[in-house]
Image: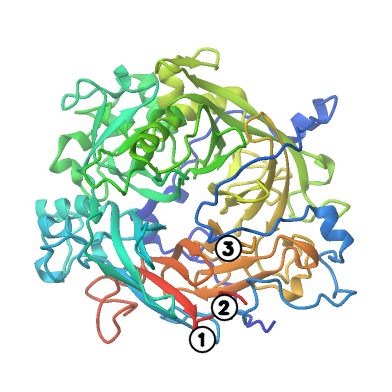
């Protein structure tokens, strides 16, 4: 495929192209703060050198799986030995054999890296906006007007900075879906003309609250294309930063979650910083509360050393917040309400089919910076939910239910299945490398050409059928494990990872894929040295981990599918595929599968000088590791929430035009409306111009 080489000019912290202002409002400028995980931890070399035997992994056994975000049955993915036997070459030199036609689902002309202010798709494809910030979600919503925004209007309009997207077919109504989207964060300088960051008005703050949360929107497909048009439907709904949530699981009612407004410790106003998510097989949506710490002020006023340590471990370092919400609601002032912050950082679940239902925060899945939770169902109905803690040197988790999923979509089945994540066991991952002596921090693959190893899931917390929690960590109560889960991972020696973001189980093979976005602090002077799963110091470009898991058990094997970056550099690896024939990819973030079994990756903060994009990666056969760019997003934007089915690709375009020199008054982008308009985050659908199948 043709490739356009761009100069490498990473800007922020040397690790990504993400603007400083984006970091400030998206994650509280986490990459410029001190690393919250200062625990000793367990490093790969320590584990390998003391292990007497390689841990075995339970294999085999028929498993029923449910596709989450996939559009049909998937082809099975071969393991590495199968790929090698069919002609995959090492990551050096040209292929020695004819690879034949492109893998089904990836037969498109790769989009070249670029810095255009547009959504760019392959030749023969089209794209269009589905819905944008401020568009009507509920009847009665006024037309969006930047100069006349109100909180009351925004509660009926599509929120800001869309991240996760899911499409749920409406039974009995052809080509009609519920589009469920979460809204991660607000960037006020790009929302209000003449915004004064030091003196926001109360109405601007309330508009910010209304722009968080989730949107449920009925959309209508257009025959012969992948276009989607929003409609007012009976399920349309806005969930915001003030919508009531109920806490469930072992920490519900804990003293650690009680506040003056909620002395029961069971009800929370709102959800914040919802990042990625997942669809459940029972028709609900899971979403992760990620960088919640940035919304809470005055941590430095907490003098109790235990409480102060807990705040620091979650990245709360004191002072005013950027948005100044604490001026208008004391629950955002830790000095006034020290427990309120503990009510955020959970996996939330909403039932989009019941607009009057109260959404849930599941405490059995632990509290940390959840990127998402995605579900795998074993043959006996056990539900396994995977989640990453999106922080440098933090951990990977899974929850295994003790209850079994009930089939069907009756209201009784849904009500039961929404309790599945309240009873079971929470685990954290420890990984061991196969080649500890070969890892020098350069990213060079070990002899044999691949990074690989074994691992185990260490139990932290058991949630009993009666709702009682049982701690499995010495020196911590069940409530403490649930609310301060990071400390539990520290105590048991979990493996420190390079920002574990989205998990995605392959709906047919059951293999689990993890996007590890980047970590420029990795190295001898950082919180942990390089190891085999995180093989580079100053890791600017990230990697993708492939896990062969004993889903309901405690052991697994793993390998690195991709070590991302410039294919011309020696520290990259593409599953054994020839790097001269791949698209450059940097900072993997969200993951999805297409109907053919290919993995699709969206990026956040491309450190190679190009706009972020969406990439297809082949997992099977001689093209395993082939990486092709399908689209790019506009200037300053991040690619989020990919959905890839037979007829369309859907992405969320987040924070378009966010550069450090720009604002609403002086925009760097005019996407999506063109002319002299300011940028607006939006959901986009792309499809094949002739009405054919994606990638065929």
Number of the front mark, 3 or 2: 3
> Mark 1 sits on what residue?
690
User: Is residue 241 placed above or below 148 in the rendered structure?
Assistant: above
Q: Residue at x 49, y 66 (%)?
A: 17
* Mark 3 secondary-structure assignment: loop
* Mark 2 secondary-structure assignment: loop
Q: Earlier in the sequence, mark 1 or mark 2?
A: 2
> Mark 2 sits on what residue?
113
Q: Which mark is residue 340?
A: none
Res 327 quadrant in image = top left
- Quarter of the figure with the N terminus: bottom right
Where is residue 526 drawn, in percent x and y?
A: 60, 42
Q: CA distance from mark 1 to mark 3?
A: 19 Å
User: Is residue 303 placed above or below 398 in the rendered structure?
Assistant: above
Number of the front mark, 1 or 2: 1
Q: Earlier in the sequence, mark 3 or mark 2?
A: 2
* Mark 1 secondary-structure assignment: loop
At label 2, counting other C-alpha atoms closer than 10 Å, the crowd grade (few under 14, some 14-19, many 20 or more) is many
Res 596 quadrant in image = bottom right
User: Is residue 115 placed above or below 552 in the rendered structure?
Assistant: below
Where is residue 489 drawn, in percent x and y?
A: 55, 28
Res 532 quadrant in image = top right
> Mark 3 sits on what residue?
594
Q: Earlier in the sequence, mark 1 or mark 3?
A: 3
* Foreground pick, 470 / 518: 470
């Amino acid at each position: 495929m043709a490739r356009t080489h761009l100069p490498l000019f990473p800007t922020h912290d040397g690790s990504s192209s993400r603007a400083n202002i984006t970091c400030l409002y998206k994650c509280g400028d986490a990459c410029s703060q001190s690393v919250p995980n200062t625990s000793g931890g367990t490093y790969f070399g320590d584990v390998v050198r003391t292990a007497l035997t390689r841990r075995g992994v339970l294999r085999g056994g028929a498993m029923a799986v449910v596709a989450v975000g996939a559009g049909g049955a998937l082809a099975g993915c071969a393991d590495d030995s199968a790929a090698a036997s069919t002609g995959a070459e090492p990551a050096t030199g040209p292929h020695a054999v004819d690879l034949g036609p492109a893998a089904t689902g990836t037969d498109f002309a790769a989009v070249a890296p670029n810095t255009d202010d547009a959504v760019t798709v392959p030749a023969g494809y089209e794209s269009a906006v589905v819905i944008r910030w401020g568009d009507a979600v509920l009847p009665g919503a006024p037309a969006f007007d930047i100069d006349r925004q109100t909180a009351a209007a925004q509660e009926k309009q599509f929120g800001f900075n869309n991240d996760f997207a899911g499409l749920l077919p409406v039974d009995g109504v052809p080509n009609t879906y519920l589009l469920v989207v979460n809204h991660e964060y607000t960037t006020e300088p790009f929302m209000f003309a003449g915004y004064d960051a030091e003196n926001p008005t109360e109405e601007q703050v309330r508009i910010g609250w209304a722009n968080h949360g989730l949107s449920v929107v009925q959309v209508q497909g257009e025959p012969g294309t992948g276009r989607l048009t929003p409609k007012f439907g009976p399920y349309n709904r806005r969930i915001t930063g003030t919508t009531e949530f109920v806490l469930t699981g072992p920490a519900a009612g804990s003293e650690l979650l009680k506040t003056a407004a909620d002395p029961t410790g069971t009800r929370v106003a709102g959800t914040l910083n919802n990042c990625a998510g997942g669809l459940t097989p029972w028709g609900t949506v899971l979403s992760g509360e990620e960088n919640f710490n940035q919304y809470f002020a005055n941590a430095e006023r907490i003098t109790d050393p235990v409480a102060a340590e807990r705040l620091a471990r979650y990245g709360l370092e004191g002072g005013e917040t950027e948005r100044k919400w604490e001026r208008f609601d004391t629950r955002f002032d830790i000095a006034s309400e020290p427990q309120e912050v503990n009510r955020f950082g959970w996996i939330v679940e909403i039932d989009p089919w019941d607009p009057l239902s109260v959404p849930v925060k599941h405490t059995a899945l632990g509290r940390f910076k959840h990127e998402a939770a995605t579900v795998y169902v074993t043959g006996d109905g056990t539900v396994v939910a995977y989640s990453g803690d999106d922080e440098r040197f933090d951990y990977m988790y899974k929850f295994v239910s003790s209850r079994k999923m009930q089939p069907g979509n009756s209201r009784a089945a849904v009500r039961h299945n929404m309790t599945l994540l309240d009873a079971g066991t929470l685990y954290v991952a420890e990984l061991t490398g196969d080649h500890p002596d070969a890892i020098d921090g350069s990213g060079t693959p070990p002899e044999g050409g691949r990074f690989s190893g074994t691992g185990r899931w260490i139990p932290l917390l058991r949630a009993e059928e009666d709702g009682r929690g049982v701690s499995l960590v010495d020196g911590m109560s069940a409530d403490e494990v649930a609310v301060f889960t990071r400390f539990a991972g520290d105590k048991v020696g979990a493996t420190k990872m390079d920002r574990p973001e989205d998990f995605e189980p392959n709906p047919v093979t059951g293999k689990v894929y993890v996007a590890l976005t980047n970590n420029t602090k990795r190295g001898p002077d950082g919180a942990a040295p390089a190891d085999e799963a995180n093989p580079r110091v100053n890791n600017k470009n990230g990697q993708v981990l492939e896990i062969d898991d004993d889903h309901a058990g405690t052991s697994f094997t793993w390998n690195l599918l991709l070590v991302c970056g410039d294919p011309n550099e020696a520290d990259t690896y593409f599953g054994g595929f020839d790097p001269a024939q791949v698209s450059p990819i940097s900072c993997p973030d969200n993951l999805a599968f297409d109907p053919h079994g290919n993995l699709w990756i969206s990026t956040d903060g491309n450190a190679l000088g190009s706009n972020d994009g969406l990439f297809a990666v082949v997992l099977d056969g001689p093209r395993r590791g082939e990486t092709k760019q399908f689209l790019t997003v506009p200037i300053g934007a991040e690619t989020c929430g990919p959905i890839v089915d037979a007829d369309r690709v859907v992405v969320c375009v987040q924070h378009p035009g966010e550069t450090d020199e720009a604002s609403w008054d002086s925009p760097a982008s005019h996407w999506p409306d063109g002319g002299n308009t300011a940028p607006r985050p939006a959901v986009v659908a792309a499809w094949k111009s002739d009405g054919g199948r994606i990638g065929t």
